[in-house]
Amino acid sequence: MGSFDLASFMTNTAVLAAILILAAMGGLTSERSGVMNIGLEGKMLGASCVVAIIAAKTGNAWIGLGAGILTAVALSMLHGLLTQAYRLDHIISGMAINLIAVGGTKFMYGKLADSSARSGFPSLPANFYEAVAITIAVSLAIYIARFKGGLRLLAVGNDPDKSRQVGLNPVSIRYTSLVATGVFCGLSGALIVTNAGGFTDNMTAGKGFIALAALILGGWRPIPVLIACITFGLIDAAQLQFQGVAKIPSEAWNAMPYLITLVAIAVMNSRNRAPAGLGRA
């Protein structure tokens, strides 16, 4: 039987929370503009794979990070094209993004990753991503509450028709928001592969969906979403820490974050504060 390691627990909480915060802020910018986005998972996975390959090939962590972010932005633009130009259902488009990422990363990593990518790659420290995650969440809260661009984001997300009547262009604002979604999901994916030290198939393991759950629990507001992500990060770190400490099967510990997410969503469902224009043209 192992023992509780407080330092390891706190480190894991910080990393896992930062992963969720970055992805959830990506979901927030997208959904506040009216674009439903269940494709966060695919954007994170695509970024993770590209970061591992490019950082190893160039020997430069910043180039790897930049390539990962560009990959997530490209997938985000694809989501924008499908939903805004071709008016595809937002959920179907998001599912397609996730499936493309699963198949694409498996193929790409198998073809392009050499021994250097598989044995390790240069990366930025985890505390860099943690600081960026907190900064983005606080900055978004200030931007939405205080700046004209933030108010326009809320306006097109709540009522795109009235927004058009006052001269706003919802499609343009949504594409801009989706760029931010790609950047934030790219950072999240980069932190996942950095923390793991290498890429493996489906390594995001549902974290994009947990970030969406945090987004819903936080009522699509940056600071409550930040708090929800920290809570989920703490729960995830706890299941890592307590595996082997208590006489409970490891499968039960692994399922705990997902079960708590489902329970939290069910409890909070009656207080749903989704943007009124979510999914509307």
Image (cartoon, helix red, strand yellow):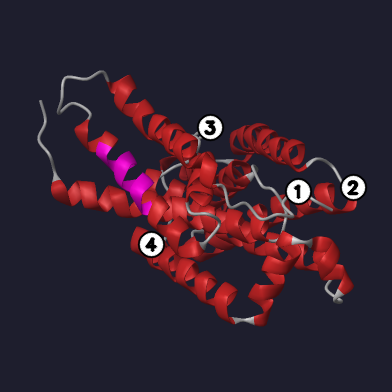
Q: Is residue 233 magenta?
A: yes
Earlier in the chain: of badge 2 and badge 4, it is 2
Q: CA distance from mark 3 to mark 2?
A: 30 Å
Q: Is residue 70 visible?
A: no
Judged from the image, the secondary structure of the residue bearing numbered disc 4 is: helix
Residue 125 position (above or below residue 9)? below
Q: Is residue 256 visible?
A: yes
Residue type, mark 1 in image = Gly
Q: Which residue is mark 2?
A: 86
Mark 4, Cα crowd under 10 Å, few <14 / some 14-19 / many 20+, is many
Count of numbered tags: 4
Q: Nearer the viewer, residue 77 or 51?
A: 77
| Mark seen at residue 279 | 1
Q: Which residue is mark 4?
A: 130
Q: Which residue is mark 3?
A: 201
What is the span of residues highlighted in magenta in the rendered image? Answer: 230-238
